[in-house]
Image: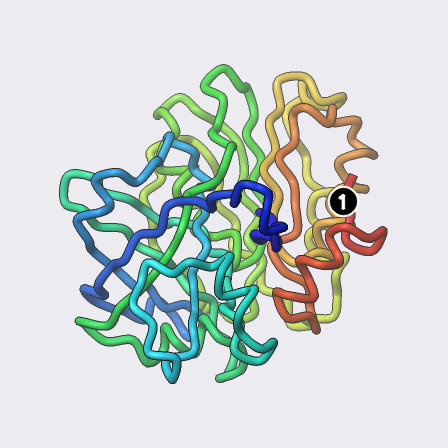
């Protein structure tokens, strides 16, 4: 997930991931803080989706005043444009992908009109252009797992929903979804015996909220020391750090956990991504 860096004139240029130039097909508000954008394009025939339920893409935003036509040569633009006109990328999870129909859906969490990607999604209309690169990803529920655990906030809902929908009818486990309002509850297919819990946190500054729920939860006896457990925990960085500590107390082995911060309260994505290389941004 690192950005393309400037290369010397004598070094071969490193190629970024292939860009897909798509057209917005539709938008739909799923709740007060979530809007879905469905986009289509023939290049999705070559979209390298490997079945990961946490597949993500990088949306590319370029100053329209530049009059550029995608796909963009990001490396060259970084070398030639002033700082204020550099391309901006934002990371989003693919909610679903249909190769045959050349369509994919992205869900955007919206809180006011700040930022870049969410305001774009709020104003998007059929026919608008969307440029993205990717996908990346690497998590998929293990069908041999005895007890699946999913935890996160609305930012993790697309990946969690995709994972739940991939489970067999025999799969068991629990989902802890932190939301601010009961209106944020949405319907999605759950073919398994996984218990989906929508948990309203009225204090967004309480980063220990989900960790306390996990600490107090009763899981099957055989999972006390991590046997047969697979965990997917993603969301706000400090909340995820607290969840990591809770999982450590339960002695869940690290290789059974997919965990990371998708965002950090009070940070833009640019700052958030930069901090991933610093102690504040690390989740062990």
x then y, percent, for residue 117: 45, 71
Between 210 and 158, the residue placed more toward the observer is 158
The number of numbered discs placed on residues in the rendered structure image is 1
Question: As displayed, is residue 104 above or below residue 118?
Answer: above
Graded by Cα atoms within 10 Å as few (under 14), some (14 to 19) or many (20 or more), the crowding at tag 1 reads some
Where residue 50 appears, x then y in whole percent? 38, 30
Residue, x 77% and y 50% (percent of image)? 277
Residue at mark 1: 283
The answer to which of 170 and 145 lies nearer the viewer is 145
Which residue corresponds to the image point at 52% horizontal and 78% vertical from the top-left?
A: 85
Left or right: where does residue 135 sit relative to residue 112? left
By what rule are the colours in the image chosen? rainbow
Q: Quadrant of residue 222?
A: top right
Picture quadrant where residue 129 is located: bottom left
* Left or right position of 271 against 70: right
Position of residue 33 measured from the top left corner of the image (x, y, whole percent): 45, 72
Residue 25 % position (x, y): 18, 64
Please name the residue shown 79% across and 26% down the image: 251
């Amino acid at each position: 997930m690192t950005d393309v860096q400037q290369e010397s004139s004598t070094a071969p240029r490193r190629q970024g991931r292939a860009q897909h130039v798509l057209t917005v097909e539709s938008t739909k508000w799923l709740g007060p803080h979530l809007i879905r954008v469905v986009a289509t394009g023939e290049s999705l025939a070559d979209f390298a989706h490997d079945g990961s339920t946490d597949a993500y893409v990088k949306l590319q935003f370029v100053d329209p005043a530049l009059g550029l036509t995608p796909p963009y040569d990001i490396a060259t633009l970084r070398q030639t444009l002033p700082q204020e006109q550099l391309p901006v990328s934002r990371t989003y999870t693919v909610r679903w992908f249909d190769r045959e129909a050349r369509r994919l859906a992205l869900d955007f969490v919206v809180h006011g009109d700040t930022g870049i990607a969410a305001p774009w999604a709020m104003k998007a209309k059929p026919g608008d252009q969307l440029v993205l690169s990717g996908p990346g990803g690497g998590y998929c529920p293990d069908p041999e797992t005895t007890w699946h655990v999913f935890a996160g906030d609305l930012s993790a809902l697309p990946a969690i929903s995709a994972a739940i929908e991939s489970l067999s009818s025999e799969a068991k486990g629990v989902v802890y979804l932190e939301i601010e309002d009961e209106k944020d509850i949405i319907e999605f297919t759950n073919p398994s015996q996984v218990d989906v819990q929508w948990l309203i946190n009225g204090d967004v500054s309480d980063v220990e909220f989900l960790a306390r729920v996990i600490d107090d939860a009763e899981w099957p006896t055989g999972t006390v020391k991590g046997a047969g457990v697979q965990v997917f925990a993603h969301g706000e960085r400090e909340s995820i750090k607290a969840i990591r500590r809770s999982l450590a107390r339960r002695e869940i082995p690290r290789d059974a956990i997919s965990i990371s911060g998708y965002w950090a309260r009070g940070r833009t994505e640019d700052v958030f991504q930069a901090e991933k290389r610093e102690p504040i941004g690390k989740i062990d």
